[in-house]
Amino acid sequence: MTPKAQLAVASWHEAPRREVYLCAVGARTPVGLDSASSSAAVRAGISAITMHPLFVDKAGSSMRLASDSELSPQVALGERLGHLLAAALAELVQQAEWSCSGRPLPCWIGMPEPRPGVTADVVQTCARAVVDALCTTSESVHRIHRGHASGLMAIQVVAQQIATGQFDLGIAAGVDSYHDSDTLDWLDQGGQLMSGSNRNGFPPGEAAGACLLASGEAVRHHRLPVLARVAAACTAVEPHPLRSLRLCVGEGLTAAVAGATENLRLPQNAITATYCDINGERYRSEELAYTLLRTQTVFVNAHDYLCPANCWGDVGAASGPLFASLAVASRLRGYAKGAWPLLWAGGEGGYRSAVVLSLGGDQRASR
């Protein structure tokens, strides 16, 4: 394996006196208008992947996409992203009973990587929607354009800054949509679009997810609910990403998973559930296989993982915060397999990110 230093690994682990809590979640997906309905649909295995009424692939067949139930197919990409993200943020604010008045809340948004269809105008439209939804300033909104990994990277950045005392409250979110003709044509031409003639592709989706993170002091001061604790996070860079000419053997994902789990007390705190962005592409499945060979000792069952792309399609940069909402739902509704879920995702450009949550009864911040 490539030496750790060459993989640009960045890890964060909770400090005993400055813990970071997950206090609210918001979601908008093709299978649900909020986090509760989306989580219930995923648990039930309900799929929103259907033939799209407008988009046609290069073979002349209707594309299979997962679409938001309330957005017209004619809505442009920038407006779609803004609508999805505003809905997720509105749920988060309502769930936390948080007032938007007062000091602007720092917000990190995971966004798609540069690709056809994602123009500067699309990004700006989405950014304005965040400012309006949170009644905040544009200076408080930061964007991370790392695709699938960016939502988890946002959680890592916010958790690290809360842990180091830079602020007490912050939002980590992610949003993505492939519902643009230029984007879909690019996927189709590159062999990534799932179709009747391509079993190695994925079903494009669209969604947004958001998480409110807080220090223990903020939890007590604002009387916030505690849904989970953010225990650790790690981001690494895969040296041989999707379009590389060399074989990917999971070096980046291995580094991210190993970095996020290196401080766990084993076997009592082994990973009990995994949420990931496996989407049907052989590249991702093979990368995971190599990773599990190296990291299997940190899992109760390394092969027991949930890949919700089967339900809401591939949701790109929204993946990480949505995985957090699924983990929280499992705890709230009593079907969690254990107290230590792992969330991971990987972008096409090579970034791999992993986050460990604690769902156990050891949450120490008192309301």
Image: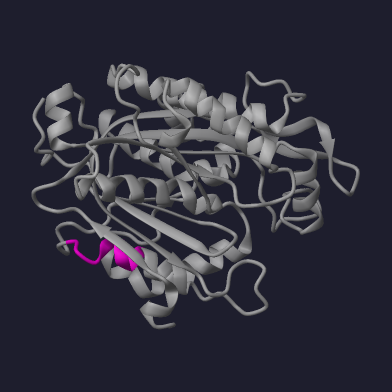
The colour scheme of the drawn protein is one colour
The residue under the point 81% across, 48% down is: 185
Asked if the magenta segment contains residue 360, the reply would be: no
Front-most of 116 and 262? 116
**Does the magenta stretch mainly form a helix, a strand or a loop?**
helix
The residue under the point 43% across, 79% down is: 6
How many labels were placed on the picture? Answer: 0
Q: Position of residue 302 (x, y in %)?
A: 36, 62
The residue under the point 27% across, 56% down is: 271
Asked if the magenta segment contains residue 259, the reply would be: yes
Front-most of 367 and 8? 8
Question: Could you say which quadrant of the image residue 362 lies in?
Answer: top left
Position of residue 58 in the picture relative to residue 166 (left or right): right
Q: What's the magenta region?
A: 257-264
Position of residue 354 in the picture relative to residue 228 (left or right): right
Front-most of 67 and 12? 12
Q: Can residue 47 be seen? A: yes
Q: Position of residue 151 (x, y in %)?
A: 45, 45
Q: Position of residue 202 (x, y in %)?
A: 66, 50
Q: Can residue 67 be seen? A: no
Question: Could you say which quadrant of the image residue 169 lies in?
Answer: top left
Q: Quadrant of the N terminus?
A: bottom left
Position of residue 327 in the picture relative to residue 137 (left or right): left
Above or below, comparing residue 90 to residue 13 in the picture: above
Q: Position of residue 233 (x, y in %)?
A: 31, 56
